Image (cartoon, rainbow, N blue to C red):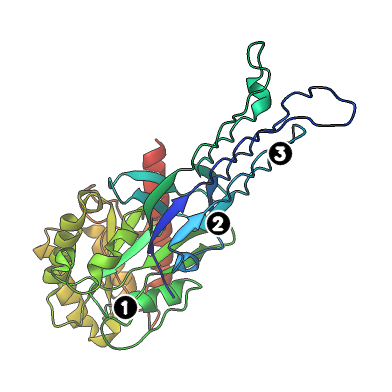
Amino acid sequence: MFVDSVELTVSSGKGGAGAVSFWTEKFVIKGGPDGGDGGRGGSVFFKVDNNTDTLSSLRGRNVIKAENGRPGEGRKCYGRKGKDTTIVVPPGTQVIDMETGEELLDLVNEGEVVLFLEGGKGGLGNMHFKSASNQRPTYAQSGLPGITKHVRLEMKLIADVGLVGYPNVGKSTLISTLSNARPEVANYEFTTLTPKLGVVHIGDYDSFMMADIPGIIEGASDGRGLGLEFLKHIERTKTLLIMIDVSNYREMKYQYETLLIELERYSETLSKRKYAIAITKIDALPQEEVNRLIETFLQDIGLQANDTLKQYKADTGFLSYGFKKEFGVLLPQKEPFFVLPISSVAHLNTEALRYALGDFVKNVVEEKEA
């Protein structure tokens, strides 16, 4: 079961109370106070683990509490420290305070262990309160209470490329073709009900992570369909691949503009994310019809065919625009990195897309590091 949000009450342990005790032993006259200190309460930690991909292990666990510290004992014996509690979460998990809405933690690095709530300090035993004027103290400190937080854990997938498109546009088929992911594939809308991650390999040493997000429809940012629930999973993606169905009853320009509008309404950051365009299902129509529709689409969104595009069309039979290096030229920043027609079923241009996306991700990473 895919669980990407849970609400929890998390508490650290209370410190143990200090002991009130006096040394009583045969032949020992007036043995002084010997009450030991209480143990510190257990702390709560978060640990990031790549082997965990959802928050399902926390589902139903409404309260998570570390162990209380044990009270001190006589003979100056200290109480045992309470056992710590570690909450294991997948990378990309945010910890949000439910009372204030503040983001407390953003856990993204594999193996990272973060102290969240520190246990209460144990109380001092009465041996600490002996003085010249008080030889027989009959009191000790109680332990300090632990800390309680009402939090919401939200998981946001971390990927290099996020697939964005209408339902049944071919996202699941593409990710199953390019990567090791095996999502459900069927010829109806909303086949994908939960996000899927896949690793796309480029040669023996390079790879990138691709995320398949359930289809976005018009009004998704207002709560229609499944888009609003899962749009958060592309917030962390470095790049977006906008997928447009050439055979759909919706016009290509309409699909394109609607997706950009929904992304902008949901998040201004998402609207500024660099993206590329894949024209899908080109095997469903005759080649001349596909090229005509692509030319119309390019003109509608303000992209003009150039010599590179014409050469690529002559080599492959299908229009393409804006490939970097041997495929073509880099487009201006506010325009798509490339436009490429593909068919995942017929494996048309899927290998070209694999390497183009690899170049795209590298380009974005290099720009950020520069």
Question: Considering only order in the chain, which callout, 2 or 1, is on the residue closer to the N terminus?
Answer: 2
The residue at which mark 1 appears reads as 170
CA–CA distance between discs 3 and 1?
68 Å
Q: Residue at x 30, y 66 (%)?
A: 230
Of 152 and 294, nearer the camera is 152
Q: Is residue 137 above or below residue 290?
A: above
Q: Residue at x 23, y 59 (%)?
A: 307
Q: Residues within 10 Å of mark 3 (few under 14, many from 20)?
A: many
Q: Residue furthest right?
A: 27
- Where residue 124 sits, quadrant-wise, is top right
Determine whether label 2 and label 3 are within 8 Å by CB: no
Give SS at disc 1. Answer: loop
- The circle on residue 49 is 2
Amino acid residing under circle 1: Gly
Q: Residues within 10 Å of mark 2 (few under 14, many from 20)?
A: some
Q: Residue furthest left?
A: 300
Q: Residue at x 59, y 29 (%)?
A: 139
- The circle on residue 73 is 3
Percent across and percent down for residue 127 are: 68, 25
